[in-house]
Image (cartoon, rainbow, N blue to C red):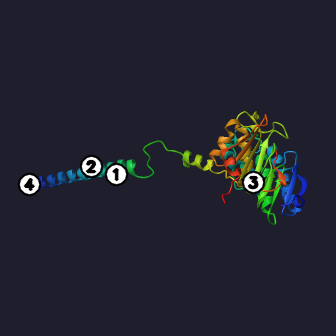
Amino acid sequence: MVERSRIERARRRARVAKAAVGALTALVFGVAFVGAKTHAPGHTKGKAKPLGAPTSFERAVRSSALQSGQIAPPAQPPVVSSATS
Amino acid sequence: MSAEAVHRFRAMGCDVALAGGDPADAAVVLERWEAAFSLFRPKSELSRVNGSPARVLAVSQLFAHALEVALDTAAETEGLVDPTLCGRWADVAVSGRMVSRPSGLVLDLNGVVKALAVDEAAAALDGPGFVSVGGDLAVRGPVDVALPAGGAIRVLAGGLATSGTASRGAHLVDPATSRASESCWEQVTASGATCLDADAAAKAGFLLGERGPGWLDARGIPGRFVGRDGEIVENDAWAGATRAVVSCT
């Protein structure tokens, strides 16, 4: 009877230990999952934006893309004319 | 540069003036562009592309380059110089030598082709000189140029182009309406680092109407505007560049 009681107590300790390990594992997984979702790159909190340069940057590049030439007052009679084409 | 040194001939449906190089070489360059992009030649590559029902097409390297430039120009001018003439340039894409565009969307690259041809011909000059096709020119070295409605300037570097309605009537299409522009200007002349830049700036300045001078000034581009009543308006960049400097001795 005494031997049976010791075996029962050992089995109970084993069940408690298994439950504790399982709960701890679930807790660690949950914390890691939420942490990754919140902080890790590739896990956006908001709606994904399309890849590409910001509109303000594109606008700045476009506005500076046309480049001026160099002109000055005439020095001689013109040899050619600029006309409507 | 004397007037005697200027060669004159016809190409691309325009009067051509050239100095500083072989006119035969320039004629070959201009004919190559004309053969590929003329809308009046049924066998031109542009005519064949426009006649194709395919949504995706393989094109020549020259065609892909010109279309890419046209799309860049449309972006730079906020859609004013538009190869689709209807505001749908963003629907056209070029990747390598493949072109994608909605079926039935017609392309018109006249907004950039002549200027590209002028720039290429000018790059092939032997030395200082210029190439002018229909009044749009690119220079290598200083060249004095007569302006619409009188006056002249010296182009030191880059290009100079004039757009408007004086010679061919109202042919510039406003992409916002897909109709001929009703600009308050008759002719707009602009300076650019290349003939392409100058031509795009002149067209944009013309199509923008009263906002044209300020739009060019915001980009540091000299522009000269001839109104329908003959009044001449120079934007600040033009006036600043062409104002004679009196030296102090």
To the question of a shared chain for discs 1 and 2, the answer is yes
The label nearer to you, 3 versus 2, is 3
**Horizontal side, residue B130 vs residue A10: left or right:** right
Chain to which mark 1 belongs: A
The label nearer to you, 4 versus 2, is 2
The label nearer to you, 1 versus 2, is 1
Give the CA separation, mark 4 to mark 3: 108 Å
**Residue shown at 78% from the left, 56% from the top:** A75
Give the CA separation, mark 4 to mark 1: 45 Å
Furthest residue in direction left, as rendered: A2
The label nearer to you, 4 versus 1, is 1
Give the CA separation, mark 3 to mark 2: 77 Å
- Residue B217 screen position, x and y as percent: 65, 45
Residue B174 in view:
yes
Say which residue label 3 marks: B159
Give, as a three-letter code, the residue at label 2. Ala
**Horizontal side, residue B218 vs residue B184: left or right:** left
Q: Are marks 3 and 2 in contact (CB under 8 Å)?
A: no
- Residue B165 screen position, x and y as percent: 81, 38
Along the line of sight, the residue nearer the viewer: B220 or B64: B220
Q: Which is more N-terminal, label 2 or label 4?
A: 4
Q: Locate residue A56: give its quadrant.
A: top right
Say which residue label 1 marks: A32
To the question of a shared chain for discs 4 and 2, the answer is yes
- Residue B1, relative to residue B218: is it above or below? below
Say which residue label 4 marks: A2
Q: Locate residue B21: give its quadrant.
A: bottom right
- Give the quadrant of the C terminus of chain A: top right
Say which residue label 2 marks: A23
Give, as a three-letter code, the residue at label 4. Val
